[in-house]
Amino acid sequence: MSDSNITNFSNPSTFILLGIPGLEAAHVWIFILFCAMYAIAILGNFTILLIVKMEPSLHGPMYYFLCMLAVTDLVLSTSILPKMLSIFWFNSREIDFSACLTQMYFIHCFSVMESGIFVALALDRYVAICHPLRHSTILTNPIVAKIGLAMLLRGAILALPYPFLARQWPYCRTNIIPQPYCTHIAMVSLACDDTRVSSYYGLFVLFCVMGLDVIFITVSYILILRAIFSLPTKDARLKTFGTCGSHLFVILAFYIPGLFISLIYRFGQNVPLHFHVLIANVYLLMPPVLNPIIYGLRTKQIQGRLLRLFTHERA
């Protein structure tokens, strides 16, 4: 790193976000791609919220969880993309230290919330397929509200130590973050003190929270698959599996890049930096784009309500 990037401060007032190092020449094209992704995420998730609100028949547990997921995706993408787009288009790289900490908090808080909502969706599918006659009595509206509140509080509480830990470290090497947004790992790597507490806490959240979520989702879908294969006819099996296939695809698209990022950060010293940053962007930005498309367009009730909405407007 050049001497111009090295400073002698311990409390920087701003950080510099580099965007995607090594791909500066393509920042305009990346801006167009990410701008399109943001527009799809905003339009798709607001459409899910609007349709569920307008259609009384969709006022059920799965659709309430989809609305929670849509709100989570809207907050997550909005906490990242506006600043990212300003870097790619206007070269506005500076971010205030407090704004960086706030962005970090929202990214980690709503990522944990999204993981929790996937657990809730897996629970809903398990009850609907394995105990269909008891679905309405097990997942009542008060229970769904309590699950949503629990996911919100879990994300808010678990993400709270991240900005407090990052604020206490001295930053005497550089204030340059080689990616387009602030995360805990990126900031801690710039600190010039013993940051093992931050690293251990990050691993705790990764394995004890995300890991438990993955285990719960895996067990749920194993039980779901057992129930599907015990159905009497092939058509019934295909129909039931179709309702779960889209859920499973979105869940894998969320967790696999996250696992890949963690492995690259710890063991992939020879992986190019721009590849690492691109994978991190996919991890954070693809779910808000994919979730409304896959959950919405592949859910027949939402498809039907959307079709009636457009047909009515044309008439």
Image (cartoon, rainbow, N blue to C red):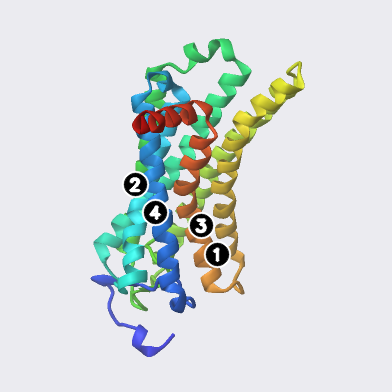
Front residue of 277/240: it is 240
Give the residue at mark 3.
282
In the rendering, which numbered label is found on residue 265? 1
Measured in 3D between alpha carbons, the distance from the residue under mark 1 to the one under mark 2, in whole angstroms, is 26 Å
Q: Earlier in the sequence, mark 3 or mark 4?
A: 4
The residue type indicated by label 3 comes to Val
SS for dot 2: helix
Residue most extreme to the front: 315
The residue type indicated by label 1 comes to Tyr
Relative to 52, say whether 281 is above or below: below
In the rendering, which numbered label is found on residue 75? 2
Measured in 3D between alpha carbons, the distance from the residue under mark 1 to the one under mark 4, in whole angstroms, is 26 Å
Taking the spot 61% from the left edge, 20% from the top edge, the residue there is 129
For disc 1, the neighbor class at 10 Å (few under 14, some 14 to 19, many from 20) is few
Q: Quadrant of residue 272?
A: bottom right
Residue 287 visible in this rendered orientation of the protein: yes
Which mark is nearer the camera, 1 or 2? 2
Quarter of the rendering occupied by the C terminus: top left
Front residue of 209/124: it is 124
Give the residue at mark 4.
38
